Amino acid sequence: MELVIFIVFSLLVHGALGNDGEIVCEDLPVGMCAYSVASSGNRCSLETYESSKRTTGYQCKTSEVLVTNIGIANLVESDECISACGADRNSVGISSDSLLESTFTSKLCSQQCYQNCPNIVDLYYNLALGEGVYLPAFCKGRNLNGRREMSQIQSSGVAGAPSAASDGYGRQLSEGPTASAALTFDDSEAAAPW
C-alpha cells in the first residue's frame, strides 16, 4: 500500500514539474499546494475562487511571499513535516493566525519540527516577525512559560509581500529582534535552526 501511495505522489509531483523539473504553483494539485515553494522561491498559496456556477473552488497560486532561506526552493513539503509541525495542507492563504493556537505552536516549537522542517519554520519565523515576535525566543519562552507567551502575538491575519528593504535573498532587513521585557534568553540557545 505504501508503494502505491509513493507512486501516486511521485506522479502528481512529476506532473507539477515543468520541463526543467521546476515547480510551478499553478500546476500543483490542490492537496499539495500549501507549504510548497516554487522554483522561483515564491511560496505557493491555496486560494479560493467562485465558479460561474456560484460554487467555491480551490486553486494553487504563486504568492508574493518569498522564502528567506535561499536553500529552500522547488519544494513540496513532506507529510512528515506537515504532521510534525501541526500544519494543515488545506490551509487557505498565508496567515499568522495559526500562531494563536497553542496546539499548533507546541508542535511548531517541538524539536521534531523546529530542527527538521526548515521550510515551515522559515515561514512561521517570518510571519511571527511580522507580528513583532521573534520565533526562537517565543518558542523558548513558550517552553518555559506555557501559554503566557501567546499574548505576544496579535494576528493581523494576512501575510504581505516582503518590503523593499531586503538583503537580496528575500530576507527583510531590520534592526534586530525584540523580545518581551519579561523574557530573557541567550541568543546562542534561541537561534533559528538554519
Image (cartoon, grey):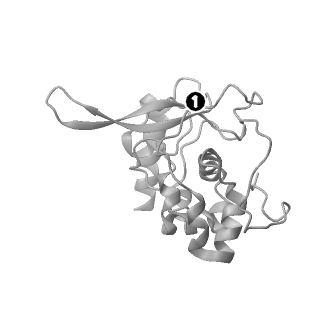
**Against 88, is 28 above or below?**
above
**Against 127, is 88 above or below?**
below
Residue 15 in picture, x, y percent from top left: 44, 33
Horizontal side of residue 96 vs 69, given as left or right: left
Residue 1 in picture, x, y percent from top left: 39, 62
Horizontal side of residue 192 vs 133, given as left or right: right
Horizontal side of residue 8 vs 185, given as left or right: left
Residue 186 in picture, x, y percent from top left: 84, 65
Q: Nearer the viewer, residue 180 or 63?
A: 180
The answer to whether residue 11 is seen in the rendering is no
Q: In terms of secondary structure, where does tag 1 sit?
A: loop
Q: Nearer the viewer, residue 13 or 121?
A: 121
Q: Nearer the viewer, residue 91 or 99?
A: 99
What residue sits 72% from the left and 62% below the top?
137
What residue sits 64% from the left and 37% below the top?
73
Looking at the rendered structure, the number of numbered marks drawn on it comes to 1
User: Toward which corner of the image does residue 144 lie, by quadrant?
Assistant: bottom right
What residue sits 71% from the left and 41% below the top?
69
Q: Residue furthest front?
A: 181
Q: Amino acid at mark 1?
A: Gly
User: Toward which corner of the image does residue 81 lie, by quadrant?
Assistant: bottom right
Q: Which residue is mark 1?
A: 21
Horizontal side of residue 55 vs 41, given as left or right: left
